[in-house]
Amino acid sequence: MIQGGPPLHGEVAISGAKNAAVAIIPAALMVDGVCRLENLPQISDVEMLLTILRELGAGIRHIDKSTVEIDCTDVHFQDAPFELMRKIRASYYLIGAMLGRFGTAKTTMPGGCNFGVRPIDQHIKGMTALGASVLVENGFIYANAGENGLVGAKIYLDKVSVGATMNIMLAACMAKGKTVIENAAREPHIVDLANFLNSMGADIRGAGTDSIRINGVTRLHGGTYTIIPDQIEAGTFMCAAAATGGEVLVKNVIPRHLECISAKLRECGATVEEYGDAVLVRRTGRLRSTNIKTQPYPGFPTDMQPMMGVLLCLAEGTSVISEGIYDNRFKYMDELRRMGAEVQVDGRTAIIEGVGGFHGTNVRACDLRAGAAVVVAGLCAEGKTLVEDIHYIERGYEDFVGKLSGLGADIRRVTDCDPVHGCAAIFCD
């Protein structure tokens, strides 16, 4: 429940990167010993993956809210809890991790947000090149390395794929010989996964470039690793500050990872000042229109597209967003139209005519980032906004309501049809 209007002001600390954490936790399955992960975000995807590892026999010990020790010394291959696995996209990282640890794997097809087909053909291509046999049947993925185990190979990805790049890295780090991944994705969380594996004894070079070289090792040992800050959570709060016309210091970030976001916010009329581990975002004048095309890193990230879409709906003039990654990522525009946005969507392109403002109403989170976007819209809207299906948001944002409240937002989490907070009287039939 959001009462819109007040500009955001203050400081907010960014949590660990979701997209790094959901690959590093499965990677811990391959570690022989105790693996201590720091700066883990408190989100539902992380908790589900930790539960899956516990079901496989791992020892899980929470040290504090953002630090967990994982001991996979005594894990053995068995069927994982598939009801959990089918709820999250990152379940497919267990293919590479299980193949590396056990020589065999069984997972569900990826779940998570529904904004287009999630093909795993590049994942399968990589595992097959390493010598595994892979079968997709009845919603499950079966993989087996055979008697000879995985053997290094040269793999060219037909399209840049973050998931496939990370999955192949997982499988290859304990394969025999050398693996080269060409046309690899370059996102910061790929570098973070490589740094984690290297700190545990792997030999991976070139992460962050389009050519990654992996020399297989026989064992990964325990250790301690700190996960990088979340680029998309930081960008979300940067957009919220600009959209509401406020001033927010976004702390615990790596400004270099945010350069493409900062550049677009400046084009829209916001001021962005970079410090060592923080960025300050403020906006006083009217937002200006601009054009955006989402691309693999270091281009503008597809995960930031919905939040920038909110900003451009409030900007003066006409803006165009071209979605270069997913086929169906504009469903949130239907929700923004309910709030007064003027948008025309044609396939992967959205043409936006800026409006003077939003009005509050009842909307829903279509997926993780779309959910964050309609919350940002609610912060800017006149009147009350009720955002439903917030379980999507909680997949990837730690304490989103609490952090926004700390910046002065009038926002609270309510249960369905809670008359104490007024939602039943205002929105429910």
Image (tube, rainbow, N blue to C red):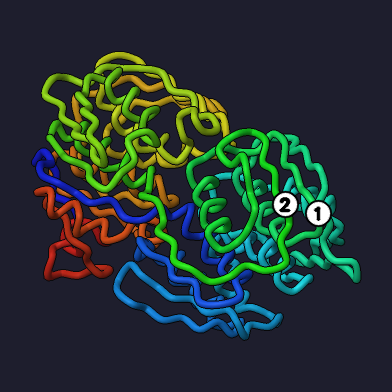
Tell me which amino acid carries mark 1.
Answer: Gly
Assign the N terminus to one quadrant of the image. Answer: bottom left
First of labels 1, 2 by sequence position: 1
Q: Are marks 1 and 2 in contact (CB under 8 Å)?
A: yes
Q: Quadrant of residue 109?
A: bottom right
Instruction: Judge by depth and name the residue closer to the eye, 170 or 242.
Output: 170
Judge left or right: residue 330 versus residue 120. Answer: left
Q: Which mark is residue 215?
A: 2
Tell me which amino acid carries mark 2.
Answer: Asn
Judge left or right: residue 173 versus residue 14. Answer: right
Q: Quadrant of residue 259?
A: top left
Rounded to the nearest angstrom, the CA distance separating label 1 from label 2 is 6 Å
Judge left or right: residue 245 versus residue 77. Answer: left
Determine which residue is flagged by label 1.
177
Across and down, in percent, residue 140 comes to 73, 67
Q: Is residue 278 above or below residue 29?
A: above
Q: Residue furthest right?
A: 147
